[in-house]
Image: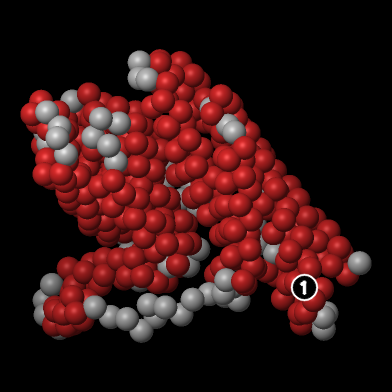
Amino acid sequence: MLALRLYKLWWKSLFRRFFANFWQNIAVLICALIICGLCVYVFHDFIAERLDAVSLAVQHRAARWFVYALASLNAIIVFYCVSLENRHKRESYSHLSGLPIAIFAQRSGHPSWIIWLYKCLRAITIALLTGYIIYTLATELFAWAIDTHIIIFHLCATSIGASVGLFTKKSGFFKTRTSFFETWLVKQTTKQLGGENKQLAAQHLRILWKLRQFWVNYPPSRKLLMASCTLISLLTLTDTNNWLESLGICLFAGNLASVALCLEEATAMRSSAYEKLCGTSHKEYMLSLWTVASITAAILFILTLTSLSLRDTLVYHYTSRSTVDIHHSMNILETMKWAWLTALPILLAPAIIFQIEIRRAGVNAVIIALIGLFLGTAIMAHLASVLLLPIFAYIAYDYSNGAYYRQ
């Protein structure tokens, strides 16, 4: 009964947080539904026509890969939401976290098995809700490709995500690691602080701090970036004739990196008072953010080029493909298009996150994915469409000028 009371208290806390900003949450919910409906509309009216042009076997293979990716994404979401229960830092609290209730129960002297039962009830609820939403989306898009194996994989992935989240604690890995480059940059910045150009040195320190937070210190962004790099490396195993696999991997890997940046900046904005009191301007903050995004995009770009080049080299040396197919697969312009498609979402992230609300990481990630889909379509049509990116970034920066102090 005590575990059920804690579980009931968690539901009440969610509803109270929702009704505390009722109209704002309703507006976000309506916008999310409109965006999801737009995605389904774009798929049925545009992408479905492209799928009809390929063979039925390729369609089933692409659909299965997409549904597997949705199930894996659901496992990651469940793992993240459930693992919040085991983090004992104040900055890890969120609107989905039952951590204050668990701390209250622990400090009130409740037995550990009651707290564990409450955590299990909470994990099952999150797994069922997110699993049902993802399964409904997959059924709406690929109802003809859903079979027993996919349903079992979806259930297993969700269960694994919930189980691992229950037993995962905040990792201490990377806490004492310092690279040679970082040590050298700190020494150079320290020298500059004693010189005349102190503003440049302060900007170097800000960029260094953001890079370390994004790549090392913040666990969600670090794990998402590792998953993105792992997906890009899988391009080596794809078939050169099956462009749907390459398209899905590039889009998914790029959007994982943009989600990592949105989550990191949403968390950093909660403790941005110190930077604002130090006099950090909106321009300086955006410059450091663009630098971090550009460095990450360059890494993803080079990794994509390397994976695709390695795939084409393996095709050339170890298969009996015709000269025309090999020339088509090793076209450098086509390879650069795939690389830009991977790097595009994280380059769009600094221009988007201040447009609505930087703390709404999920909403920003969905908007970045949609804009990246349209710009990516233009890039795949012609590589010169990359020139649209700086124009879009300038217009977005001018529109959000001064938003750093308004949020």
Q: Amino acid at mark 1?
A: Ile
Residue at 13%, 82% (x, y): give it.
191
Q: Position of residue 260 (x, y in %)?
A: 41, 55
For residue 405, say whether it is visible: no
Q: Position of residue 365 (x, y in %)?
A: 45, 44
Q: Is residue 150 left or right of residue 22?
A: left
For residue 246, say whether it is visible: yes
Q: Is residue 352 left or right of residue 318?
A: right
Q: Position of residue 121 (x, y in %)?
A: 77, 60
Q: Is residue 14 left or right of residue 194?
A: right
- Image quadrant where residue 134 sits: top right
Of 398 and 292, nearer the camera is: 292
Q: Secondary structure at mark 1?
A: helix
On the rendered image, what quadrant is the N terminus found in? Answer: bottom right
Please name the residue that numbered disc 1 is placed on: 115
Q: Position of residue 68 (x, y in %)?
A: 50, 42
Of 31 and 60, nearer the camera is: 60
Residue at 16%, 80% (x, y): give it.
184
Above or below, 6 against 390 in this view is below
Residue at 45%, 16% (x, y): give it.
45
Residue at 15%, 32% (x, y): give it.
321
Q: How is the image coloured?
A: secondary structure
Above or below, 283 against 367 in this view is below
